[in-house]
Amino acid sequence: MKLDYAGIRDKRKWISANISLPDFDIQKMVNATAKTPRWLHFGAGNIFRGFVAALSQTLLESGNSDTGIIAAESYDTEIIDRIYRPHDNLVLRVIMNADNTYDKKIIASISENLISGSLSGWSRLNEIFKYPGLQLVSLTVTEKGYNLYKTDGTFLPEVSEDIAKLQLYPKHLISQITALLHTRYKHGRHPITLVSMDNCSRNGDKLKDAVLTLGREWEKTGLVKEGFIDYLRDENLVSFPWTMIDKITPRPSPSVARELNKTGFKSTEIIETSRHTFIAPFVNTEKAEYLIIEDSFPNGRPPLEYAGVMLSDRETVEKAEHMKVSTCLNPLHTALAIFGCLLGYSRISDEMKDPYLLRLVQKIGYEEGLPVVIDPGILNPAKFIDEVINKRLPNPNIPDTPQRIATDTSQKVSIRYGETIKAHIRQTGDATSLNYIPLTIAGWLRYLMGIDDSGNTMPLSPDPLLGELRACLSESALGNPKPENIRPVLSNETIFGLNLYEARLGEKIEGFFEELASGKGAVKNTLQKYLSE
């Protein structure tokens, strides 16, 4: 059973392996999408393949769309060459249920793949952006994909190069999108919607601000036509709706690969690219999924509601996103990631069996988060967090690792913890009653020492501020933590969204850090001290 167009023609083998096949004419879809592209997506990784592309397939199979989705990749182009092209853009999605069963389905809605930094890919993208009927450009590129700046406030080198010269094809993703929007502006000022589906607060504004920054820089040097900035700012022409997305899609699991091999499906090689993307011809994911989008589409949109997407107003989206990212899921995930790495865990689900880590996420969620969360109405916060703690995180079939979740933590702590701290200050005038969020922040700094609880050196997950943060801790050691070394970090408003000393939490975090770094076994002992019943 080979994963490509020819391989899925023999339906009997796939059906006997309990693998569902696409219920639409794939070639007809590919041809229609090539002629009338309506939906383009940047960021061709696992969340796209396991969730976004599956939404497009649902619309195709229900008869609510006759076109698919085009995948573009700007960052890790190896996934196009090594995964997309050998398998005709097909992916086997495996939903891992908590009862040890798998739901397996071939996703075939991706009509073509493009490398935006190649001559052919860039040419095709410009052609797509000229097409008046293009409705939607979505993105899953992680929070750092929207960043244009170094920590000193100056532009990243590739952004500086893009600003200096509007090259054949720009290097930075935001430069590419801005240049493509300029192409659309020059060829008719057609309306369009750009939808960030990344886990960051007010993600639509992050994308819009980044695009406007590039546009203004090019306007200064005369590289874009007059009126382009007005086009970008006109919400009746170019919209950047806010979204809330939630679906755990971890790295491909070797155990899933083994189970697939038993069925006769042999396209199970898991690769790690040179940019450290873990990907395979299959994608494994949990069943739960949520996507709420602000209903602002000046050029129309696919009927996403028929695929389970919730359309709402901006205020509701913000409340739902804040509920998830700042209270009911992401803060818990990050806490498990930090302490899981320190304690040698390799699976999030195993951490949920640890009574102290379970109690930690319960305390952060129920006691410190829920009292200040605003109910979005469209989702119930208490029910949502119940599902997270009691069903989703303990699911043994979700092979998610603390090491993956710990990636880019410096870019997340302001939203996942800083917002709750600020909410307590707004509601009560004081955040000093908080204990478990400060303990977790201290745990993150202990993690950054690069030494696990047994005293062994441990690898740290990628983070754009890793070098800078590690430098602050260079003189800290087990048994001699020197908590004064972490003061520049705790006072950094860029990292946390506020100065933690002004919030009267800095000294408390110093104390926790000193305990966590007091010697071997101190992390476990500290958790037991503060989380015993």
Image: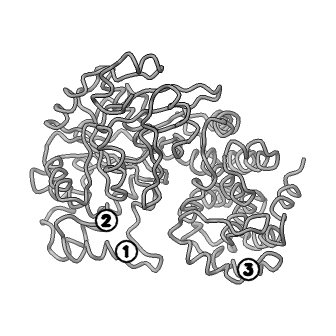
| Residue type (three-letter) at the residue carrying disc 2 | His
| Mark 3 or mark 1, whichever is nearer to me | 3
Give the total number of marks visible in the rendering: 3
Q: Does label 3 or label 1 sit earlier along the sequence? A: 1
Residue that numbered label 2 is attached to: 172
Numbered mark located on residue 189 in the image: none
Tag 3 and tag 1, C-beta contact below 8 Å = no
| Residue 41 place in picture, x, y as percent | 31, 46
Outermost residue, bottom side:
475
Quick one: label 1, few (<14), some, or many (20+) residues within 10 Å?
some
Q: Residue 525's quadrant in the figure?
A: bottom right
**Residue at the image point whose x is 25% and y is 74% from the top:** 163
Left or right relative to 251: residue 195:
left
Quick one: label 3, few (<14), some, or many (20+) residues within 10 Å?
many
Tag 3 and tag 2, C-beta contact below 8 Å = no
Residue that numbered label 1 is attached to: 156
| Residue type (three-letter) at the residue carrying disc 1 | Leu
| Residue 64 place in picture, x, y as percent | 29, 23
For marks 3 and 2, give the CA distance: 36 Å
For marks 1 and 2, give the CA distance: 9 Å
| Residue 252 place in picture, x, y as percent | 51, 43
Tag 1 and tag 2, C-beta contact below 8 Å = yes
The quarter of the picture where the N terminus appears is top left
Q: Residue 229's quadrant in the figure?
A: bottom left
Residue that numbered label 3 is attached to: 476
Q: Does label 1 or label 2 sit earlier along the sequence? A: 1
Q: Secondary structure at mark 2?
A: loop
Outermost residue, left side:
187
| Residue type (three-letter) at the residue carrying disc 3 | Ser
Quick one: label 2, few (<14), some, or many (20+) residues within 10 Å?
many
Q: Secondary structure at mark 1?
A: loop
